[in-house]
Image (tube, rainbow, N blue to C red):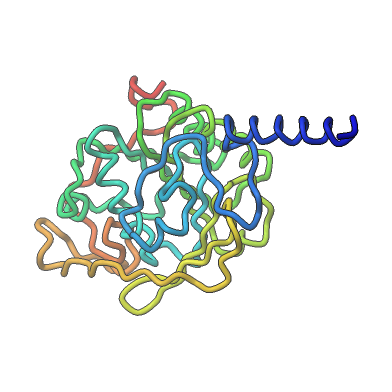
Amino acid sequence: MSMLASASLSHSAAVQSVVSALPHALWRADQMGSYQGAVCASGHAALDRELPNGGWPHSALIELLLQHPGYGEIRLLQPALVQIARQRRIVLLQPPHLPQIAAWSAAGLDTEQLLWIKAGRSVDALWSAEQVLRNGSCGALLLWQSHIRGDALRRLHLAAQASDTVLWMIRPLAAAHESSPAPLRLSLRPAPNGIDIQLIKRKGPQHEQPLYLQLTAPMAAAEMPNAVPTPSSSTLFSLLDHATVDRHTPAVAGVGNIAPTLV
C-alpha cells in the first residue's frame, strides 16, 4: 500500500472517530440532525417524528410564524407547557392579549407557575427575554414580537444556547422570508379542527408538504368559571385560543420590576 493511500485511510479513520465521539459535530442535509441539549416532547407523535431528537429543543431559538395570534399555537404547545410547569416556571412575554387564567387551570397548568411580563417597548421586551434566559430559573419562555432586527435575533439565540430554557418566539408569517439564526422555524396555518404546520427550517431533509395536526377542541365559554364576555373575546389571548378573558388575571411584572428570582 502506498504512503498516500495509507495516509488517506488514516485520515478517514480519524474523521470517523471524531464523528462517533461528537455526533453533533457533523450533520448531513439529507439526514435528520440532532441537538446537543435536551428536548421536550411536543405531545404530538406526528410532529415529534419530524423534529430532531423527537421534541422541542432546549437551549435553542424556536420560531413559530403565523398570520394572526390565536390560530392554535397555544393549544399546539399545551402538552409541552404542562410538562414544564410541573417543575419550573413559564414566562409569557408581550402576549397580544390578557392571559385567560380559567383556561390555563382547565388545561392542568398550575397558574402559580406562570409569569406575565409586559414591556412598554420592544427593546425592553428583548432585554427582559435575555434576563429570563440568563437567570435560568424558568423552564419555558414564550415571546411575541412583531418586528425584530437580525442582531437582536442573534443575541437571543446565543442567550438561549447558554441556558436550558425552551424559547418559543412567535412572529408574523411574513418573517418566513427573512434570514434567522433559529435552527427550528415552523409556520402555522388554521385547518379544520387543527392546524397545518410547514417545517420551514430544521436540521433535517426538507419537508415539502404541510403536516396536519388535529388539536383538542376548546372549552365552551359556559364551562369556564368566572369568565366575562368582552366585545373582542374572539381574539383575546388564552390557552385555548379565541376564548373569553377571565375576571382574575395574573399580576403583571413590568420592566424594572421583575420578580427577584429573575434578576
Residue 44, image x and y in percent?
Answer: 33, 59
Q: Seen in the image, is 62 located left or right of residue 91?
A: right
Residue 249, x across and y down, in percent: 23, 46
- Above or below residue 185? Residue 193 is below
Among all residues in the image, which is located at the extreme front? 1
**Which is more toward the observer, 186 or 34?**
34
Name the image quarter holding the C terminus.
Answer: top left
Percent from the top left, x then y, of residue 155? Answer: 61, 34
Q: Quadrant of residue 206?
A: bottom right
Kindly indicate the quadrant of the structure image that contains residue 190. bottom left
Q: Taking 149 as reference, is 130 above or below it? A: above
Residue under the image location 42 percent in, 36 percent down: 38
At a point 20% along the width and 36% down the height, the residue shown is 112
Left or right? Give the position of 37 relative to 105: right
Res 185 quadrant in image: bottom right
Q: Residue at x 78, y 35 (%)?
A: 9
Give how far across and how far down residue 171 sits, in percent. Answer: 52, 55
At horizontal 56% and vertical 64% (from top left) the residue drawn is 173
Q: On the rendered image, what quadrant is the N terminus found in?
A: top right
Please tell me how many numbered marks the rendered image carries.
Answer: 0
Does 152 sit above or below residue 97? above
